[in-house]
Every structure is written in C-alpha cells, then in structure tokens.
Amino acid sequence: MTSIRDVSKVAGVSVATVSRAMSRPEKVSDKTRKKVLEAIKATNYRPDVLARNFTTRKSRTIVVLVPDISNPFFSRVIRGIEHAAQRVGYSVLLGDTRGDPAVEDTYASMVEARLADGIIQLNGRLPFGDTSGGEDTGRGDDAGGDAAGSSDTFGRSAESTKKSVPLVNACDCVHGSNVPTIELDNASAAKAMTQHLLSLGHQHIAVVQGPVGSSLTKERLRGHTEALQEAGLTLDSTLIAEGDFSAASGEAAVTTLLAAPSMPTAIFCFNDEMAMGAMHSLKKSGYAVPGDISVVGFDDIQFARYCDPPLTTIRQPAEGFGTRAMEVLLGMLEGKEPEVLNQYLPHEIIIRQSSGPVKK
Amino acid sequence: MTSIRDVSKVAGVSVATVSRAMSRPEKVSDKTRKKVLEAIKATNYRPDVLARNFTTRKSRTIVVLVPDISNPFFSRVIRGIEHAAQRVGYSVLLGDTRGDPAVEDTYASMVEARLADGIIQLNGRLPFGDTSGGEDTGRGDDAGGDAAGSSDTFGRSAESTKKSVPLVNACDCVHGSNVPTIELDNASAAKAMTQHLLSLGHQHIAVVQGPVGSSLTKERLRGHTEALQEAGLTLDSTLIAEGDFSAASGEAAVTTLLAAPSMPTAIFCFNDEMAMGAMHSLKKSGYAVPGDISVVGFDDIQFARYCDPPLTTIRQPAEGFGTRAMEVLLGMLEGKEPEVLNQYLPHEIIIRQSSGPVKK
DNA sequence: TTTCAAAATGTAACCGGTTACATTATAGAA
DNA sequence: TTCTATAATGTAACCGGTTACATTTTGAAA
C-alpha cells in the first residue's frame, strides 16, 4: 500500500505539498502540481479514505432510516437519495429499522460515533434526543482567523449530553421540532382525491388509513374530512379502518368495511398496496370495481397502472423527496440553516379506471 | 468528545487496558474491568469508530451493488443482507449502479480505498478485474487539472496486482471465476414451470426473457428448452421476445409475440413485472387470461398474488439469498474459503389462476 | 520463604492522512 | 540593490484508537 509519504519521496516534495496538490490544487505551483500528479501515477497511489475520514472527522456518509426497504415507494425515495449522494461523492448507509426504535437508536449512535455525518429519516419518529441544531463541529475549514488557542479547549465542561445529529425528515414527518421536513401537502392531496370521489357522486366513502400514530395518516384524514365538510357531509367513523400500508391489511380492512352499517360506494386507501389488497378482496367477494365500489390509492407506485382496473391514485415525487432531502442535509452539514424548514413537494391526481360514478 | 485517554485517566489505568477491557474483556481482571466500565459510563465515552476503523484497517462495512433498488425482488434481497449485517454489527452501503459499469467501478474502488471490506453484487458483471483506476476518490470538486485520471485500460494495472476484493455474487451470477455465487438453479426452475404449462396442454409457449447477456436469462431459457425437448417439442425462435425485467417491456413484448406466425397459448415471462405488463397488454387487446392465453412469471413478488388473475410464478427465497450471501462474504472476510463455491437455494412453483388449460 | 511461569498492566509506537506554523523563494517597489 | 509582501513549500504535531513489547503482579510449587 503506497502512502502519501511514498508519493512525496518520489515527487521530491513534502507530504504537505502532496496533500495540498490533491485537495487545494490552486495552492501549489504548476510545476509542483505536475510533479506530484506524476508521482501519484507512478506509485499508483490511492488516498486511504479511512485515514482521511479519521483526520477530517467526517465520513462523507449518511444513513437512511427506512421502516421497510421492500416498500416500492420507499425504495424509490432511497434511489433518489442515493443518486444525489453519488453526485457529490457521498455514500449512503442503509438502515432498515423494521419500525424498531432500538434499531433506529443503533443507527443514530453511528452518527455520534462519527461513522456517518447525518441522517435522513423516512418516517418521523421521535427526534433523536435534542435536535437543538446550530453549533456544528468547530474545526471548520475556514482558513482565516484561527485564534491563538490552537489546541482544542472546547467546553467539555458539562455533560454535553445528546449531540444534535444533523437530521432531515422526509415523507412522513413529525412537526413542531426544528428538524427540516420534505413531504407532500398530505391534507390537500387527500382532499383533492376525496373531491374527485364526491364529484362522481359518492356519499359513503370509506377510508383505509395508515397507522393512527403517524402524522401522515392524520393529515390525510384531515384533508378527507375537510372535503367532506365542504360538501356538507360528515365523517362516518364506522367507515374508517386502520391498515399498516401492507396489501394484506387492505384486504383485511375491506371485510370490516363491508360489514359497516352504511355500505360504502368508494374506498380511499392511504397507499396503493392497501388499495390493491382492497380490490383483490372486493373482487373475491363478488363486487365489481369500479362498477359496485370505487377504489383509489395513494403514491402511484409502478404497479398501480398494471392493476385491473388500473388504479386511480395520487402521484408523489418519490425520487424528488430523496434528492431534496439529500440537498437539505448536505446544506446542514456545511453549516447552513435550511432557508425553508418545511418543504412541500407537489402531488398529482392520477385518474385511472378504478374510480367511477356511484352505482345507482 | 471524550477519548480513550480520558477514560483511562478516570479509571486510573492505561489506555491499553481500557482498549482491552472493551475488545477482549477476558484479558482483564474483574476488578479492573469493573473500574473501566464505570469510568466509561461516568465519562459518557463512545469509541470513535472512525479512529478504530483507521487503526484496524477494517470498516466493518460492505457494499451492495444492485442495478435497481426499486425492483421489489432486489429490495427483498437487500433486506436480507441488511438484517444479516445488523446481527453481526456490519453496515451496508447501498450502491445503485443503474447498470452503469462506471458506477460499479466507483464502488469497487471504495473497497480499495478501504471504505468497505467487501462487495455483494446482485447481478453478475465482469469481476472487477481492471482496478487500474487512479481515479480520485469522488470528492465533489475536482476543480480542473484532472490530468491524472481518465486513462484507463493501461497495462500498468497488471503489475499492480489485480487486488482481489472480497466479492460474492448473488441472484444473477457469472460462473467460471472463483467468485462465490448464491442463486437459484434457474434451469431447473424454468424447466419445472414449462412442464407445468405443458401439462396443461400448451404447445406454443412464448417466452419473454431478460437481457440476453445475463446468465440468468440463458439458464432459464436452457431449462425451458430442455422441458420442451423432453416433451418432443422444439423451441420456436419466433416465440422468444426480449425484455428488460420492467413491466413496460413485458407490455411491449406481447405485441411482438401476438404477431408471431404461430399464435402462443401461453407466455412465460422471466419475471413477475414483465408478466404483469404482459397480462395488462393482453387484456387490453381483448384476450382473457388464462381463458385465451396463460401467463406465468418468475420471482413471486409481493404483488403477484394481487394481480387479476393472481399470477402463477416461481417463488425465490429473496431474503435467503441476501442472508446467505452475507454469511459467505463474512466468512471470506475472516479468511475462510467458502466450502461450496456455487450455492443453489430452492425454488417453489406457485400455481395461481393466471395459468390454465389450453383453449381448444 | 523463594522461585518462576502466567496473568495483568503499562509504555509508546504506529496507522496515513491534514494543517498550523515556520521557513524559504519570488517578485514588485523603493 | 535592498526591502518587503506574498506565494510556495517544509516540518512536525495531531487525530484516537490498537497492539507489540516491556514491566509488574499474582499465585502456586518448590
């Protein structure tokens, strides 16, 4: 393994010059730079990233916390993150939490142990500890004015407690903290979908929501309720079923809903997988979709248009969430406060054939 | 940030003892260990992973190279890898290559730069032979003077020893090298499926294969042909269409196949997404599935059973591939040669409703 | 009590970069 | 030419672990 010292020997310069030639080429003269570059080539030198990470105290790695990678929506978000990271030379560590807070903590502690510089969390749980933000790792790259007290006399006085880890929340976000969020205006999107169903004449619209704890669920339900109210209707709580975003839970929810006092003529599922499960279950019970009952979803996953009938749903810019989240996190890592704390990306209602006029 | 020296001071022992108390507790006396543990707690000490990785020359990280994370089959494999890694304290770096060999090389060079200890590759390309690289490490800003890189395929790498990076190949594997592989017996699986179709009376079975370069495609086609031959039939090359594992390509393939001289009565797609695309296309053209034409897939992704009709397919142990691949790689990292170079995991034919007797 | 191998612990070098600070080279001004 | 500001380069400390080797302690046998 050739080291920077080998290169410096071959090039006939000091290690500092080699280092500078690589990281800040404008600080070395042309001829020196050329010599160094040649020496690098001659020795087949590759900088040791582990050593560099160690000295710079940065890993140029971020972790993505996701409850389930095999969810097609999340995997697209991850792809967006990954590509954005690749472009700027960052790598992404994958953390499949299976919803387990212990696993989340494990990954959060990786940041504390400096294995990663920041976290993008795809479903908002409790923020890790403090999150007070501000204050980044001293030792910036600003060449200027490093006062006399060179040695780090940092105030390690009190228990510094939870270092605030750079954190961005995407897709399903918690609010009220100062953690930046990137998400859909879930209420508006859901409202628009419900309005679509209302416009088709549906009055008894069932909902298969997500886990009740999630803010995403709350927001979507809020939008739905709002649309109902504006149409002079009220929310019928017997038409609300809870799902967990899996197709199986959509399937199960339908049996509950069909037993409700007032028969629904449409079912609004809070993601496409549950919608697919619901359609499957309906058809198995002999109901035509959308002839007897309309079904609509949320996300517009790749498979939505291959359903039978193709699924009416709400398209989310999945990759966009990822790239945007990465941009914001990158900014934070450079010490910038995000100019907008809560960002909303646009949705689009995709009307296909699973929704139709109410059956008379 | 508290360091190991802080802990040693508080505990009244040397740094070596602290280090040993953590990594090899049996080498330290009970009372000392207790003192150290208390000091660790008192100082709120967390070992600096970057420093540890640097000194031990290991990152306890592996990279997973996948052509497309949003493929539901791959994402399950990844989940398997990730969970297996979590159990042994490894992290996984995600590398979405988009099939781009340049991206693959970038990730391969991470191993050389010691950012990762090994690689699991989910689709077999050429083994990273060349490694000439010399490329930069992917710091975002190579302002100017890129004179060093760019020239690859220069003989020099031969002398620089083909660094063998610990590599495991899973799912779609290249053979003939000494890279361990974990996969299905694709030929047998495909053969079994074709036999299923033959048993339903189908004589004109079309195939929507994957990219022709892949060994997975070749093997499955081989199994298919074998079944045909054993039934006294020969492969009709006009009934072979090429796809790229996307639903859209399955959709497109169907139009080609329907124009073939001999009308197929069944279509065997080499993955479920293409099968879903094919079914979609067939139904749009007015064909009943399986009434007019049977369609079968491969993989048994989560959505296969929610298709209409539910898809007959071949179940692969996706998570199993992941965990097994991780086990093998782990073994290699510990210096063990894998006892079996080419492992085959079992498949299972899942017969649902998309395949039926041939139409008379 | 003495002896000595084994166990426990300490000392300090080392990994390979980065960078503060010191030193030397360069060039324009006086 | 001499002086001085600035650019270019060199020296060496430093990051925070691990571990080879040296030293001390322990405990059982002699």
Image: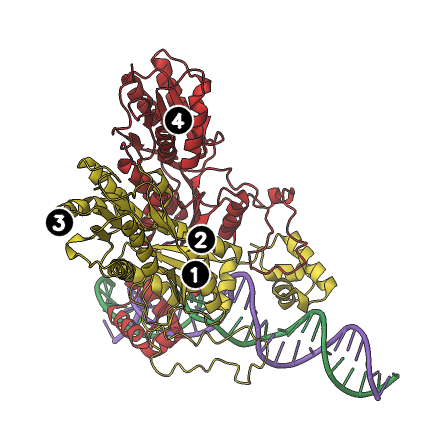
Chain colours: A yellow, B red, C purple, D green
Q: In this orientation, which residue lies closer to the viewer: B262 or B140?
A: B262
Location of the C terminus of chain A by quadrant is: top left
Residue denoted by label 1: A325
Look at the numbered discs 4 and 3 and tell me whether their residues touch, using CB distance below 8 Å. no
**Residue A80, which numbered label?**
2
Q: Are marks 2 and 1 in contact (CB under 8 Å)?
A: yes
Q: Residue at x 68, y 54 (%)?
A: B147
Q: CA distance from mark 2 to mark 4?
A: 32 Å
Name the subunit of mark 4.
B
Q: Amino acid at mark 4?
A: Arg
Q: Are marks 3 and 2 in contact (CB under 8 Å)?
A: no
Counting from the top left corner in percent of width and height, residue B240 is at 44, 23
**Cα distance in 3D space between marks 3 and 1:** 41 Å
Figure quadrant of the N terminus of chain A = bottom right
What SS does tag 4 mark? helix
- In this rendering, do the residues under marks 3 and 1 share a single chain? yes
Residue type pointed to by label 1: Ala
Label 2–label 4 contact, CB within 8 A:
no
Q: Nearer the viewer, mark 1 or mark 4?
A: 1
Residue at disc 1, secondary structure? helix
**Residue A86 or residue B90, whichever sits in front:** A86
Q: Which residue is mark 4?
A: B220
Residue at the image point whose x is 44% and y is 69% from the top: A340
Q: In the rendered structure, which amino acid carries the disc numbered 3?
A: Ala
Category of crowding for the residue at label 1, using alpha-carbon neighbours closer than 10 angstroms: few (below 14), some (14–19), many (at least 20): many
Say which residue appears at 44% left-offset and 28% top-offset: B253
Q: Which mark is residue B238?
A: none
Residue D15 as seen in the image, left or right of residue B13: right
Q: Which mark is residue A260?
A: 3
**Rendered image quadrant of residue B17:** bottom left
Q: Give the letter of the chain under mark 1.
A: A
Q: Chain of mark 3?
A: A
